């Protein structure tokens, strides 16, 4: 099994917002082969099994309801009944502590389950109350009422944010592992890399940022340019350099008899990222993937061109 291709496949799928269901089996394989317990636990929790009731969850999985909506009959005596539909229950009347307890919702389902909930519900999310919460509201607020339906309402943006955060952490981790630990040529004789892997996994899961020791982060010389409404794109010089290198590789790949389709696939990834203006790391990763694809005279020429040009491009 080509682990390098497996990880780069997941990186590509994440970068292009492909269905979560398509990456879960790959993540199971990768988490076993990586032999890092913290990473395996995180993958199991986020993508495979969900978080157990007794386990701690990341902050982005702690969400708050916007309201509680109920439909019920209010018995007023002497046979008089009033009917209410989609009535916003004033649970603040339960007191601040009860309000906080009911309003706080820890989301423990897998990312795939959350995605399915969003697919099945086009608007905000309706969640059922526990029996205790229903009883408390019945006794303290909706006395003499016959509740037919009651739900917590949660903005779908909370659920979208959970998916976005988990996918972003995974993408950052794989890109850093591929580039920093395995130098874009992933080698899974990894026991000698155990410390570096643990450092990247820990930094990415717990902070969402990876910066090596004794290093600094700045964007002064970045090839990513800010735009309106927080949209980003690459500088003209960066795009020119990448396109020139891509054209050279495409021309040389015509003489590659084996694995030409794999090279074309990596080139398509590069062009897509140039168009989207999002991930210079994915572009660099694709060029490095091309270097490792084939073994022939033509492929040697491609590697030579990439090795000469890539160090001169600022990613």
Image (cartoon, rainbow, N blue to C red):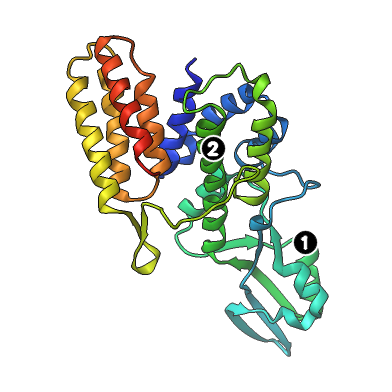
Residue appearing at x 23%, y 39% in the figure: 243
Q: Which residue position is annotated with label 1? A: 131
Whole-percent x, y for residue 136 in the image: 81, 72
Residue appearing at x 51%, y 21% in the figure: 3
Q: Is residue 115 left or right of residue 232?
A: right
Whole-percent x, y for residue 175 in the image: 50, 37
Q: Which is nearer the eye, 136 or 242?
A: 242
Q: Is residue 59 left or right of residue 143?
A: left
The answer to whether residue 24 shows anywhere in this view is: no
- Label drawn at residue 237: none
> Which residue is the extreme one toward the top?
296
Residue appearing at x 77%, y 83% in the figure: 93
Q: Is mark 2 on a helix, strand or loop?
A: helix
Pointer 2 or 1: first along the chain: 1
Q: Is mark 1 on a helix, strand or loop?
A: helix
Whole-percent x, y for residue 113 in the image: 57, 45
Between the C-alphas of marks 2 and 1, the distance is 46 Å
Residue appearing at x 65%, y 43% in the figure: 213
Q: Which is nearer the eye, 141 or 313?
A: 313
The C terminus - image quarter:
top left
Quarter holding residue 50: top right
Q: Which is nearer the eye, 48 or 176?
A: 176
Q: Which residue position is annotated with label 2? A: 176
The answer to whether residue 113 shows anywhere in this view is: yes
- Residue 57 vs 148, above or below: the answer is above
Number of numbered discs on residues: 2
CB contact under 8 Å: marks 2 and 1: no
* Residues packed near mark 2 inside 10 Å, few (<14), some (14 to 19) or many (20 plus): many
- Residue 14 vs 3, above or below: the answer is below
Q: Which is nearer the eye, 181 or 166?
A: 181
């Amino acid at each position: 099994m080509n682990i390098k291709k497996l990880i780069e496949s997941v990186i590509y799928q994440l970068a292009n917002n492909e269905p979560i269901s398509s990456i879960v089996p790959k993540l199971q394989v990768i988490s076993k082969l990586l032999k890092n317990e913290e990473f395996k636990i995180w993958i199991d929790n986020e993508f495979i099994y969900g978080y157990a009731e007794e386990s701690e969850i990341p902050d982005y999985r702690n969400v708050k309801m916007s309201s509680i909506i109920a439909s019920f009959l209010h018995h007023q005596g002497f046979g008089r009944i009033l009917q209410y539909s989609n009535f916003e229950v004033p649970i603040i009347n339960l007191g601040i502590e009860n309000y906080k307890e009911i309003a706080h919702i820890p989301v423990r389902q897998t990312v795939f389950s959350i995605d399915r909930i969003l697919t099945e519900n086009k608007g905000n999310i309706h969640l059922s109350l526990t029996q205790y919460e229903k009883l408390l509201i019945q006794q303290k607020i909706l006395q003499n009422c016959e509740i037919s339906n009651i739900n917590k309402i949660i903005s779908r943006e909370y659920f979208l944010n959970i998916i976005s955060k988990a996918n972003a952490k995974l993408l950052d981790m794989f890109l850093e592992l591929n580039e920093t630990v395995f130098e874009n040529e992933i080698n899974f004789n990894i026991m000698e890399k155990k410390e570096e892997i643990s450092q990247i996994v820990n930094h990415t899961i717990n902070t969402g940022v990876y910066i090596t020791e004794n290093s600094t982060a700045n964007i002064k010389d970045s090839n990513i340019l800010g735009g309106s409404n927080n949209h980003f794109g690459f500088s003209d010089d960066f795009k020119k350099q990448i396109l020139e290198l891509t054209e050279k590789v495409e021309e040389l790949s015509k003489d590659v008899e084996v694995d030409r389709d794999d090279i074309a696939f990596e080139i398509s990834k590069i062009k897509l990222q140039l168009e989207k203006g999002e991930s210079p790391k994915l572009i660099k990763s694709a060029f490095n993937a091309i270097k490792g694809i084939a073994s022939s005279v033509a492929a040697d020429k491609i590697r030579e061109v990439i090795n000469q040009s890539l160090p001169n491009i600022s990613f």
